[in-house]
Image (tube, grey):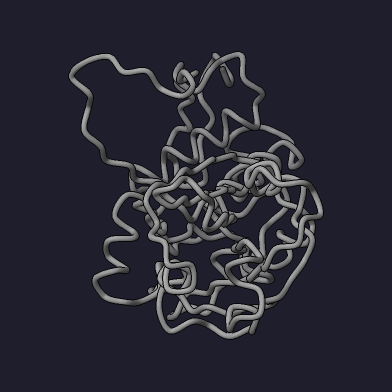
């Protein structure tokens, strides 16, 4: 808890009340971040509002500038605020991309468009490469097996802001020597192209999610601030005969993506491939 005596006054005369739910044992910078986060969510600071200067906030919470900057860094990494050079720190508009995994294929089949048609696609590489080890494990092939990869960067159509880094890994026996080795955006969903080439239909899919810190390259491409995490999904699509048609991976800034998964709750017990740990 901060200052168990008389609470400090902020520059506007409001008391900076640090309540028990902030965690009295948490480091001060996390308590400050929690207080400011709550004030943003409660509407005291609205989207595009500028936060008070760091000196004013440090005085309000009676902490050093270093501690205050650490608190601001937490909120910046979460994507709640952004710093504008020479202007100040502002509350960001809370707008996340929604990924609804279970209806993506059906929609794309219906409109014959890309799975992410709301974004601008740029194919940065297409061709044959040795499969990376983490994808080889998912595909069940030896590392360095040759596959066709299509690497892409996706941008917001209105903002032109980078939103996703992605890649699709396709078995060479399906995609080698075809138009999928050309670095051009396909006219319809890649899975529809793979179905046409293979004569097989996507039947099942599996997503593996992990939250992690980005690589230096990912951070540069996505324009991330220091410490900002990413969400990384590896998506495996199989045909009815259980052969793999595609393994793709996508990387998003964690503060810009929301995973929505709606499903029926099973009335009786089932035997999953592996138990759920959470």
In the depicted structure, whether residue 190 falls above or below residue 10: below
The quadrant the N terminus occupies is top right
Q: Relative to residue 93, is residue 255 drawn left or right? A: right
Please provide percent x and percent y for residue 145: 77, 56
User: In the picture, residue 218 is in which quadrant?
Assistant: bottom right
Please provide percent x and percent y for residue 251: 59, 55
Q: Nearer the viewer, residue 199 or 113?
A: 199
Q: Relative to residue 170, is residue 129 drawn left or right? A: right
Note whether residue 116 is visible.
no
Q: Relative to residue 130, is residue 166 drawn left or right? A: left
Please provide percent x and percent y for residue 231: 57, 47
In the depicted structure, whether residue 42 falls above or below residue 273: below
Q: Residue at x 51, y 40 (%)?
A: 10
In the depicted structure, whether residue 223 falls above or below residue 117: above
Q: Relative to residue 201, is residue 148 drawn left or right? A: right
Q: Nearer the viewer, residue 191 or 178?
A: 178
Q: Residue at x 79, y 48 (%)?
A: 143
Q: Residue at x 44, y 41 (%)?
A: 13
In the depicted structure, whether residue 204 falls above or below residue 22: below
Note whether residue 217 is visible.
yes
Q: Nearer the viewer, residue 14 or 44?
A: 44
Q: Nearer the viewer, residue 16 or 99?
A: 99
User: In the picture, residue 14 is in which quadrant?
Assistant: top left
User: In the picture, residue 216 is in which quadrant?
Assistant: bottom right
Q: Residue at x 58, y 19 (%)?
A: 3
Please provide percent x and percent y for residue 128: 74, 71
Numbered label tally: 0
């Amino acid at each position: 808890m901060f200052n168990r005596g008389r609470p400090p006054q902020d520059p506007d005369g409001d008391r900076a009340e640090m309540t028990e739910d902030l965690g009295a044992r948490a480091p001060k910078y996390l308590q400050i971040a929690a207080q400011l986060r709550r004030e943003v969510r409660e509407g005291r600071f609205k989207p595009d509002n500028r936060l008070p200067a760091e000196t004013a906030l440090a005085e309000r919470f009676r902490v050093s500038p270093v501690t205050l900057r650490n608190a601001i860094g937490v909120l910046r990494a979460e994507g709640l605020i952004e710093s504008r050079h020479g202007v100040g720190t502002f509350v960001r508009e809370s707008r996340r991309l929604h990924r609804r995994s279970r209806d993506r294929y059906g929609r794309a089949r219906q409109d014959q468009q890309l799975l992410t048609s709301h974004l601008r696609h740029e194919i940065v590489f297409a061709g044959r490469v040795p499969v990376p080890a983490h994808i080889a494990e998912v595909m069940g092939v030896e590392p360095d097996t040759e596959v066709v990869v299509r690497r892409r960067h996706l941008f917001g159509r209105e903002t032109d802001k980078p939103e996703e880094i992605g890649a699709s890994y396709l078995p060479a026996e399906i995609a080698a020597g075809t138009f999928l080795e050309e670095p051009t955006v396909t006219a319809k969903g890649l899975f529809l192209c793979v179905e046409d080439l293979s004569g097989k239909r996507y039947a099942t899919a599996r997503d593996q999610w992990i939250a992690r810190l980005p690589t230096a390259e990912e951070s540069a491409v996505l324009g991330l601030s220091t410490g900002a995490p990413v969400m990384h999904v590896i998506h495996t699509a199989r045909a009815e005969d259980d052969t793999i048609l595609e393994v793709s991976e996508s990387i998003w800034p964690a503060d810009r993506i929301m995973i929505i998964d709606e499903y029926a709750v099973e009335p009786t017990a089932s035997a999953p491939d592996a138990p759920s740990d959470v």
